[in-house]
Image: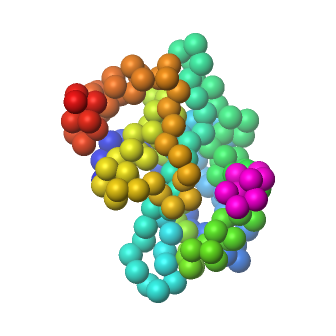
Amino acid sequence: MFEFIKKYSNGSFSFGIEDNLKAKCMEIQYENIDKCCGVYIVYGYPKDKGDKEIVYIGSSGHFEDNRLIPRKGGLRRRLYGRQKDDLSGELVFRSILWPRLMQRNSIHKLEICWYDTGKEHNPLIVEFCLILTHIICRKRLPVWNNELKLDGRSKNDFEQFVKEQNITSLITAINQ
């Protein structure tokens, strides 16, 4: 489904409800993980032993004045940082939120796959393309994502990225 991200440097790790998410993130052996921008896809494995399913797609960093601006702590910190809890509306560390969501959704294990999008691609646009592709294929957002958003100023960059990466499912959509 996401052929266009296979070219990026990447890695993955698994996370169970009893695991320490920050410790798992600190084990990542990639020299740029603390200063890179990128995207991550979180797969959930249901307790009923069904196939893994994408539950969340996120990103770290953005472009500003044609410059890549990484978040403090890079992609690693984004993975264990805070996320808004849809039920309470509060920002909660993922080490607390994800086990809660796993229990709510009967998921026994997560697989977190991360991708360093490099200096030439805006991670927000890559994230947008991933979520949009998921919606086209599955007819819904990933269960832990609550919106699809793209800053209006990024529309041209989005269209250019889709064409350069030859994302056929999205090329059809933007040409209509």
> Where does residue 156 sit, x and y in percent of width and height?
39, 19
Q: Residue at x 39, y 27 (%)?
A: 158
Question: Does residue 119 appear anywhere in the picture?
Answer: no
> Where does residue 61 sit, x and y in percent of width and height?
61, 33
Q: Decide: is 135 above or below 96.
A: above
Q: Quadrant of residue 64?
A: top right
Magenta: main secondary structure equals loop
Question: Does residue 18 appear anywhere in the picture?
Answer: yes
Q: Quadrant of residue 105?
A: bottom right
- Report the quarter where the C terminus lies: top left
- Asked if residue 108 lies in the magenta stretch, the reply is no
Q: Residue at x 55, y 69 (%)?
A: 110
Q: Quadrant of residue 96?
A: bottom right
* Count of picture labels: 0
> Where does residue 154 sit, x and y in percent of width and height?
47, 23
Of residues 6 and 169, which is closer to you in this image?
Answer: 169
Q: Residue farthest to the bottom?
A: 48
Q: Decide: is 76 above or below 170.
A: below
Q: Is residue 155 left or right of residue 77?
A: left
For the rendered model, the colour scheme is rainbow
Q: Residue at x 53, y 15 (%)?
A: 66
> Where does residue 63 sit, x and y in percent of width and height?
56, 23
Q: Decide: is 31 above or below 134.
A: above
Q: Which residues are magenta?
A: 84-91
- Asked if residue 87 lies in the magenta stretch, the reply is yes
Of residues 71 and 118, which is closer to you in this image?
Answer: 71
